[in-house]
Image (cartoon, rainbow, N blue to C red):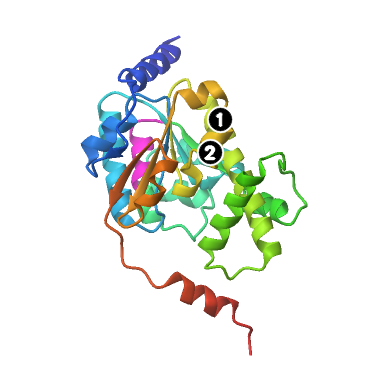
Amino acid sequence: MRQRLAFAASAVLLASAASAAPARVDATPDALAAAMRGSQVVILGEVHDNGIQHVLRAAALRKLVEGGARPAIAFEQFDQPMQGAIEAARKERPRDVDYLVAQAKAAPGWTWEHYKPFVALALEYDLPIVAANLSREDAMKVATGEGEHDAAVPDAFLREHRSAVERGHCNMLPPQAVQGMARAQIARDRALARAILPYASRGVVLLTGNGHARIDVGVPYWLPAGARAESKSIGILERFEPATAPAFDAWVVTESVERPDPCAGLARQMKPKG
């Protein structure tokens, strides 16, 4: 009973200021926390390698929690089959962030220094940590046509996913690869939506890329109508890319970070050996 009351209190705190958020949110922890407050499900976007955005999101989420909210924190960065390992790590070493990340066999492709503050916050306040993503193995099966995927989507929906894959890979991929990767992206969105749904009644914040956070083709599309009505998708964009802002319920614009030309790097990877 005590736990149910705590869940109910958390739900009230997250929903107490329910109202339509302004389209654009200032890039400050206070403003972002205020934008998150009022929704049972928050889908919080990011540019994965932008440390400025991670610092902002972590500070905002801490303000939300320090204000009394107790949402689950769901991670795209943890694959669903690792949920048991995460729970075991919490029992064995309750405050050891590095141990939990290691036991969850977190993919090295993620810059974990960006995500450890969120894990630390969850451990500090005993918040559920949700491994939300489809495993790489299952995503590969979908991409190659071996796994299950829902093809019953509008043509325009699938075209947008294909276009996003093409743009994201500098228009260098062969058509068959684009189709498979688009199917895998859709499967990931559905998996993320299923993972967060059980936590909607207490409140949940999903940490994920901006592509997954899009309301037109991302995770929100796959939420049931009731959960979607109680959700808010917040894109965290870099300066000079606000054209994608209408794809979110609200958005923040931060500075971009210096990075190597991704197209040049991909061209080198795809160049035939020898």
Q: Nearer the viewer, residue 117 or 59?
A: 59
Task: Tell me if residue 209 can be seen.
Answer: no
Q: Nearer the viewer, residue 175 or 116?
A: 175
**Residue at x-position 31% and y-position 62%:** 257
- Circle 2 sits in a helix, a strand or a loop, which is it? helix
Determine whether label 1 and label 2 are within 8 Å by CB. Answer: yes
Residue 173 located left or right of residue 26 = right
Magenta portion: prevailing SS class? helix
Residue plotted at (63% across, 85% down): 273
Q: Is residue 202 above or below residue 179?
A: above
Q: Give residue 219's position: percent from left, percent from top.
A: 53, 38
Q: Position of residue 154 (x, y in %)?
A: 66, 41
- Magenta range: 117-127
> Which picture quadrant has residue 113?
bottom left
Mark on residue 219? 2
The label shown at residue 223 is 1
Q: Which residue sits furthest right?
A: 146
In the displayed structure, 110 sits above or below 61; it is below
Q: Residues within 10 Å of mark 1 (few under 14, many from 20)?
A: some
Residue 177 is a magenta residue: no
In which quadrant of the rendered image does the C terminus lie? bottom right
| Crowd class of label 2 (few under 14; some 14 to 19; many from 20; radius 10 Å) | many
Distance of label 1 from label 2 (alpha carbons): 7 Å
Residue type pointed to by label 2: Val
Image coords of residue 140 (percent x, y)? 68, 55
The question of residue 119 being in magenta is answered with yes
User: How many tags in the picture?
Assistant: 2
Residue positioned 71% across, 39% down in the render: 152
Looking at the image, can residue 247 be seen?
yes
Mark 1: amino acid: Leu
Look at the numbered disc 1 and give the secondary structure of its residue: loop
What x and y, as percent, mark residue 141?
A: 72, 53
